[in-house]
Image: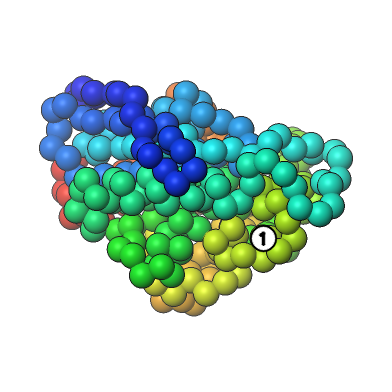
Amino acid sequence: MAELDVREDEVAGRHGRIPIRRYVPTVLPLGSTVVWIHGGAFSHGDLDMPESDAVARAVALTGRHVIAVDYRRVPPWSWWKQPRTGQLSGVRYPLPVDDVVDVLDQIQSEHAAGDVILGGASAGACLAAAAALRQYSDGRPTASGLLLAYGIFHAALPPIPSELRRRIRGRHSVMQFRPDTVNKMNRNYAGSLEAMRDPFAFPGGHDLRGMPPTLVIDADHDSLRASGHQFANELREANVSLARNVVAGSSHGFLNRPGTAHFAEGIDVIAEWVRSQDGDNRLV
């Protein structure tokens, strides 16, 4: 089995230092480098949460240099209270996505730009997609691939199809991201109504031409799958190379639960897709 060299580092971003953690295999040859963005509703999470550390370790053990990013997070928000009106103060959009872009630029300067894949989960998937779109819009080299796990990509949750409504009933209805919950979370991140309409805050519903080849992984019993499904359709309409996978029986955040079958399946899907992007035929 491969061993890992795990070390703390930082990137000098436009808003100050950005902590990162590097996971480098010491035995297996390296394939594509993966920059990984954890979730946490834009306001929670860190480099030690399983969705960051356990995922980074698992992917690195397949022979990848993985860089986990500790982007700036917005203030906590309430599931029950309505967000304040007007411009919200403190860390808001675009600071978190600026951090992701700054780290991605740094890692691309260290490696061949065509060998860097950008990925994230939940809110981190939104940040990853937005960063890739902004790179393309700015005329800079984009990531060679984009992997997105159970993300929210739209400012407002798209209509939930009847099939998905059946999947999130009963015990799966607990702590679902309902439309009003998504609105509170996204408004808290965006900081203003104007920013809610910005494609680099929420790329869903905007022009996605030029996005890199993308893997969309959704959780089975997850209302956010409505956003993942619509975003996948929008990528297809933009002629983006797309792979999509729904992890059967899983719920939102399964990559934050190492040791489970759903976590293992998610890592296998990610590893296989990354291998397909760089032509690496080694066994995982």
Give me the residue at 44% from left, 74% from top: 209
**The N terminus: image quadrant:** top left
Q: Residue at x 54, y 45 (%)?
A: 96
Query: Residue 73 in the image: x percent, y percent?
Result: 59, 38
Using residue 141 as the reference point, say whether residue 51 is left or right of it. Answer: right
Q: Is 78 situated left or right of 225 in this image?
A: right
Instruction: Kindly tell me whether residue 177 is visible in this rendering.
Output: no
Whether residue 225 sits left or right of residue 110 in the image: it is right
Q: Quick check: 2 above or below 104?
A: above
Provide residue 39's location: percent of width, then percent of height: 55, 39
Considering depth in this image, is 256 or 117 the residue closer to the camera? 117
**Which color scheme did the rendering employ for the protein?**
rainbow
Residue 282 in the image: state x and y as whole percent: 16, 43
Query: Dot 1 surroundings within 10 Å: few (below 14), some, or many (20 or more)?
Result: many
Quadrant location of the C terminus in the rendered image: top left
Q: Mark 1 points at which residue?
A: 195
Q: Which amino acid does label 1 sit on?
A: Ala
Vertical order, 58 against 97 (above or below):
above
Q: Which residue is drawn at 42% across and 59% down?
A: 132
Q: Quadrant of residue 194?
A: bottom right
| In the image, residue 271 above or below residue 257 | below
Residue 13 visible in the displayed image:
yes
